[in-house]
Amino acid sequence: MQQHVKIPQDRIGVLIGEGGETMRRIENRAGVRLDIDSENGSVAIEQVGDPVDALKGPDIVQAIGRGFPPEDALTLLDDEMRMFDLIDIDAAARNKRDRKRKKGRLIGENGRTRELMEELTGASVVIYGSTMGIIGGPEQVQIVREAAERLLDGAPHGSVYAFLERKHNELKRKGMDYHRYPGGT
């Protein structure tokens, strides 16, 4: 089985890595073979190993293409529940100026909004070109997606931060449900 992913020209070097190191790491960990066409940014991904891991191959390549460092993209293999999601900022914008404004809302002053999304959910968030990429568990990805959609719809940053705080506390509470209190009987 072979799949194709197209990535931006300026991300091909990151995908390949120094001396092909990153490409080999992806191939070994995901059980795939990558055929990278550096002329047009097309990457053919062929399954050669474990089919379950190989399913994540295209997501890993696309995540790197959308601005994630290879280390973050490879975390998709750490747990079968980890996923990659992409939000198209262009789809929410009326024109170039509007896209720039909406992208700025997602990034926040000095990157603070993007950082808060990461800190409060535990997901990895990258804004690159006209997309916002998210890597995390299903719940983490859903929370970041909802926060981003609220910002893109014009919600005040304060209300989105409050939403993120509330969801952060819910995630913490859920996490605590699985761990018995060590001091109890």
Image (tube, rainbow, N blue to C red):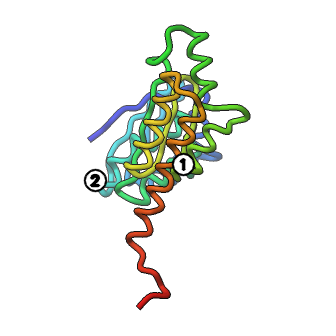
Residue furthest toward the right? Answer: 110
Q: Residue at x 71, y 32 (%)?
A: 109
* Amino acid type, mark 2: Pro
Question: Crowding near pointer 1: few (<14 within 10 Å), some, many (20+)?
Answer: some
Residue picked out by circle 2: 51
Res 75 visible: yes
Relative placement, left or right, of 170 versus 53 is right
Looking at the image, which is closer to me, 151 or 166? 166
Q: Quadrant of the N terminus?
A: top left
Give the quarter of the image for residue 53: bottom left
Residue to which mark 1 is pinned = 165
Tell me if residue 42 comes above or below residue 141 in the rendering: above
Residue 24: percent from left, percent from top: 51, 51
Helix or strand or loop: what does disc 2 sit on?
helix
Q: CA distance from mark 2 to mark 1?
A: 38 Å
**Vertical comparison of 126 with 135: above or below:** above
Front-lying residue, 114 or 12: 114
Q: Tell me, yes or no, if residue 24 can be seen here.
A: no
**Of the numbered discs in the image, which one, if any, rests on residue 119?**
none
Choose mark 2 or mark 1, whichever is in front: 1
Q: Earlier in the sequence, mark 2 or mark 1?
A: 2
Q: Amino acid at mark 1?
A: Glu
Circles 2 and 1: CB atoms closer than 8 Å: no
Residue drawn at 53 percent across, 53 percent down? 122
Q: Residue at x 58, y 32 (%)?
A: 127
> Furthest-top residue in view?
95
Instruction: Identify which residue, 177 or 127, lies in the foreground.
Output: 177
